Image (tube, rainbow, N blue to C red):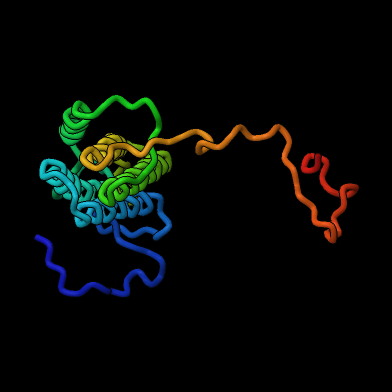
């Protein structure tokens, strides 16, 4: 049971913080970067939900994901040990299966993509695209932590390992958020499509630089690749 009676403790004023097993590490630790990015992703999903405009089934999935992300962060904050006095909560393969089922369910209702898409459309869709990019960053940070600490259990005082399913979960979640961002635009004009070059005419082979009559930079001393 969580019982928070005060928020500030001053114990981190030396640049250290406690992990889930009460061992202490520096705030620059790769594991902290991973679960901090996971926390940021959770906040972004919360903004998407608060913006409204989401179908009830999408909102229900996102609320479950928010709870899962808190658990992912707790997993990342707790080193993998050979044994525990109290078994910690860990991300399970079944959670990844749920995300894949959600991806299949919602993607099956969408038209096939024939172009890359831009973040936009409804506010909810844009926020979900933002959450997707943050989750991808969290996954990269998690792999960075895995490269630093490995996945092998290690007894204290060794740092301990990382549960690799945290990275797998984040990977599938980024896919789901991309799909749900598309779903959020279905009833409001659909996807915002990327147009290569933004619809501009083909760029000239050589770049040109317009030089004013009183510009001290003359044709003679201008870079050769900027003057016709």
Q: Position of residue 46 (x, y in %)?
A: 22, 55
Q: Quadrant of residue 14?
A: bottom left
85 relative to 77 in the view: left or right: left
Q: Position of residue 171 (x, y in %)?
A: 31, 36
Q: Decide which of 165, 132 is in the foreground and name it.
A: 132
Quick check: 159 above or below 25? above
Q: Decide which of 154, 124 is in the foreground and name it.
A: 124
The residue shown at (42%, 42%) is 144
96 relative to 41 in the view: left or right: left
The residue shown at (19%, 32%) is 106
Q: Decide which of 181, 196 is in the foreground and name it.
A: 196
Observer able to see residue 107 = yes
Observer able to see residue 173 = no
Q: How many dots with numbers?
A: 0
160 relative to 58 in the view: left or right: right
The residue shown at (19%, 42%) is 90
Q: Position of residue 228 (x, y in %)?
A: 81, 39
The residue shown at (68%, 34%) is 204
Quick check: 185 above or below 127? above
Quadrant occupied by the N terminus: bottom left
Q: Residue extending furthest right? A: 220
Q: Decide which of 13, 214 is in the foreground and name it.
A: 214
């Amino acid at each position: 049971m969580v019982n928070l009676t005060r928020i500030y403790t001053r114990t981190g004023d030396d640049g250290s913080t406690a992990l889930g097993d009460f061992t202490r590490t520096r705030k620059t630790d790769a594991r902290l970067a991973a679960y901090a990015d996971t926390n940021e992703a959770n906040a972004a999903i919360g903004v998407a939900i608060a913006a409204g405009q989401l179908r009830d089934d999408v909102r229900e999935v996102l609320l479950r994901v928010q709870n899962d992300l808190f658990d992912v962060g707790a997993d990342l904050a707790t080193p993998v040990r050979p044994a525990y006095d109290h078994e910690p909560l860990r991300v399970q393969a079944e959670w990844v299966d749920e995300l894949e089922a959600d991806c299949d369910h919602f993607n099956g209702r969408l038209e096939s993509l024939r172009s890359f898409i831009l973040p936009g459309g409804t506010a909810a869709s844009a926020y979900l695209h933002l959450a997707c990019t943050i989750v991808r960053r969290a996954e990269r940070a998690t792999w960075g932590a895995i490269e630093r600490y490995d996945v092998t259990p290690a007894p204290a005082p060794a740092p301990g390992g990382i549960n690799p399913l945290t990275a797998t979960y984040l990977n599938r979640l980024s896919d789901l958020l991309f799909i749900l961002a598309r779903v959020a635009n279905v009833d409001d004009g659909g996807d915002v499509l990327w147009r290569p070059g933004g619809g501009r005419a083909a760029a000239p082979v050589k770049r040109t630089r317009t030089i004013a009559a009183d510009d001290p930079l003359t044709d003679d001393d201008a870079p050769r690749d900027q003057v016709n």
